[in-house]
Image: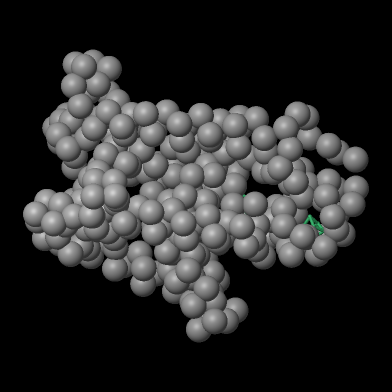
Amino acid sequence: MKSRRWVQIGFFLFIAAIAVNHGLTEAGGGISWIPNASLHAICPFGGVVTLYTYVTDGLLIKKIHESSLILMGLVLFLSILVGPAFCGWVCPLGSIQEWIGKLGRKLMGKRFNNLIPNRADQILRWLRYLILIRVLMVTAQSVQLVFSAVDPYYALFQFWTGEVAISAIVVLLVVLGLSLIVERPWCRYACPFGALLGITNLFRIFAIRRKPATCIGCKKCNAVCPMGIEVSTTTKVRDLRCITCMECTSDAACPIPETVELLGGKPNEN
Ligand code: SF4
Ligand code: SF4
């Protein structure tokens, strides 16, 4: 879907510009017309990890700003409406994994996305929930931003500043390397924020729906899904992994118009 590509590129460049300008400003340089905010200040997951401390003590954990709480609220509201569109359209780490995945698809051919056995995939997809629970618990106990030590999102834009832990750079390199053999490995198996947003797929107002009456069972919708969801076997996608990328609704995927759509209300079984 071309419009999504351009939105992803736009957000990637916007966030990269802010991150680089912040680093330059800290070093005494910086460009006045580019916003000067730290990556932590524009990360909605910062709002999630500080929420417990904020509610119980009225305090933000170190390095987190109130802007993170506002962004968290906006992203959660959007997710309740249309699901985790933040992951599919905005998150630069998700975008770069997808772009590397396109190269991987060319290099690996049919082996791309097929090297991890189904059983292992089904088990591994719960790992991100364990990570979410662990990050929330340790952050609440320590009142420190513990996740930044392994956060590939932070490492992606700050690796050149000397402020990033080696462990985060290693995680970033592993994620980018794995993106050559499996689509969005961090999103599928490890991202705690994606795990949280994914829960909204169970009750989101506008959902991805398939009309069985017009579906011809070609399974092209399954093939384009970056999260490995079998759209062709459901009438309403409730899978926790859906990132509302809308690839399955595109005319380039499903050959029958209006068979897979983003719709509110009750599922159309006709
Ligand atoms: S089900 Fe559709 S919208 Fe959801 S992740 Fe897969 S392709 Fe994207
Ligand atoms: S691409 Fe369209 S016609 Fe083909 S299986 Fe999916 S919903 Fe059915």
The N terminus: image quadrant: bottom right
Determine the residue located farthest toward the left in the rendered image: 28
Q: Nearer the viewer, residue 162 or 205?
A: 162
Q: Nearer the viewer, residue 122 or 175?
A: 175
Q: Residue 117 appears at what percent x and percent y?
A: 52, 66
Q: Residue 186 appears at what percent x and percent y?
A: 40, 57
Q: Quadrant of residue 105?
A: bottom right
The C terminus: image quadrant: top right
Counting labels gives: 0
Q: Quadrant of residue 124?
A: bottom left
Q: Nearer the viewer, residue 216 or 95?
A: 95
Q: Residue 220 appears at what percent x and percent y?
A: 74, 64
Q: Residue 45 appears at what percent x and percent y?
A: 34, 39
Residue drawn at x 49%, y 65% as measured from the top left: 98
Q: Is residue 121 above or below residue 63?
A: below
Determine the residue located farthest toward the bottom in the rendered image: 107
User: In the picture provided, is 174 more to the left or to the right than 214?
Assistant: left
The reply to whether residue 134 is in sight is no
Residue drawn at x 32%, y 42% as measured from the top left: 43
Q: Is residue 227 above or below residue 78?
A: below
